[in-house]
Every structure is written in structure tokens, then in C-alpha cells.
Amino acid sequence: MHALDGRTGLATLSDSTRARKPTKRRYFVGGSDARIIVGNDEAALLRLWREKRGEVEPEDLSGNLIVQLGLATEELNRRWYQANTGQVLTDIQRRIRHPALRWMAATLDGRVEATGAVFEAKFMLPWSFSEEAAAEKYMPQLQHNMWVVAARTAVLSVITGGGKWVEIATHADPLYQHLIVTAERKFWRCVESGEPPRLFGVEPPKPRIEAVRIRRYGRLQFLGGICRPIPQHAASFPGP
């Protein structure tokens, strides 16, 4: 059974990479793992530890509709982002290992060619969506991936089930990253030693939404292919 996060309207294991090649994920800590490792769900932490040790099979997400919607809309998300920002995405679905911490890696949805920013595509349900909830939920993953590839910025591109698109851009936070990497290092030692991990008690600073650049766009227009939507309150938001 796959639970939904009632606060954000997201599947609790909604990272699309967990549904693609789960067996290879045993051998490194990835961005979606960061959310579990610094989270407060002990059962999820222990299951992740057992998966990394090869004691249990990764959860089968093929029957999780929210995860599958995320997979189905990922390419649309990239096309929509590029069409509406004029940016070009590279390194799509590229897996990169940290140059020094070989147990740490990131599977990227893409990178913004002009800036090197990490690009992350997400699908969220509309009735409980908010920019604050999205930024908070995915900040560990964004910060992890920025650390792996030494990027200074990241972009979270969200399509909602209500037919809207939101772009959230944020910067690397050295303190946040230090806490995440410390918890991940301890977790990986537990994987290697066989000692069950305990919740690490990491309380990273909540993302300051005023420091996150947000652009809200109107409804996606599907008829006739990709059409540029009209920004809501366009004067209030900076251009691409």
C-alpha cells in the first residue's frame, strides 16, 4: 500500500528514480534517500537501510498512480520549462557520483545549461499544493543533488493535477548541506556495519520562502501542442 502525504498531496515515495532502476540504487545514497534519512519516519528509514543492504527488495511502485503520473509527466515538465523560460536542459537522467564520497550520487532530471542549476521535475496534487510545502519537502533532495554536482542553484519545476505549472528556484545552503551529508554518512556506515540506524534528529533550517524565487503560471494549454501560458500577476515576478 502506498500512502499519500496529506499535507502536500504527494506520494511518500514519489521520486521517479525509485521507480526506474531500483536494484542499482542499493549502491549509493541518492537525492530521494536524503528526504528519508533526514526525515522523522523511522519505519521508512529502517526499510531504506534494509534495501541498501540487500535484505529486502525495493518497494514496487508500478501500482502507485501518483508515482506513475510523475513519470508520465516528467518529459512534458522538461519541455514546458524550456518553452516558457527559454532555457536549455542537459544531463537528462544522468547519474553522477560525488568525486570524493563514492557512496553518494545523484540521478538528475536535468541541468540548466546556461547556469548549471540542478533541475528537478515533480507532479503534485492540486488541492493541498503550496510553494512552501513543495520547497520544504524537496529541499533535502535539491540540496543533496547540488552538493553532489557542486551546483550553486537549483530549480524545482512543478506541474499540478489542476493543470498549473510553478517554477521554484533556490540556492545552495552550506549549513543545510553539512547537516544532510553528516546524516547520510552516518546512515551509510550503518549500511556497511549492519547496525540498524536510528533517527538522526536532523532539523535543517526550513527553507526561507522569501529567498526562493517563485513564478506562477496559468493553466497548461494542451490543445495544439505546447502553448505559452499567460503568467498570473506577471508584473510581480521577474522574467526568465
Image (cartoon, helix red, strand yellow):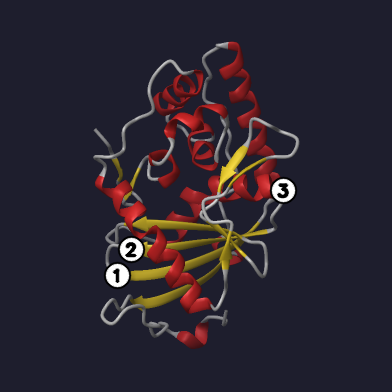
Residue 188 position, x and y percent, is 60, 24
The label number, if any, that marks residue 32 in the structure image: none
The amino acid type found where label 1 is placed reads Gly
Residue in the image at 61% along x and 39% along y: 105
Marks 2 and 1, how far apart in space? 6 Å
The amino acid type found where label 2 is placed reads Thr
Marks 2 and 3, how far apart in space? 30 Å
Residue 108 position, x and y percent, is 55, 51
136 or 162, which is in the foreground?
A: 162
The residue labelled by disc 2 is 160
The residue labelled by disc 1 is 163
The residue labelled by disc 3 is 174
Compared across the picture, whether 230 is left or right of 109 comes to left
Q: Quadrant of the N terminus?
A: top left
Residues at discs 2 and 3 in contact (Cβ within 8 Å) = no
Residues at discs 2 and 1 in contact (Cβ within 8 Å) = yes
- Label 1: which secondary element: loop
Residue in the image at 63% along x and 24% along y: 186
Give the class, few, some or many, for how many residues have Cα within 10 Å of label 1's Cα (few <14, many ≥20): some
Which is nearer the N-term, disc 1 or disc 3? 1
Residue 220 position, x and y percent, is 32, 75
Q: Nearer the viewer, mark 2 or mark 3?
A: 2
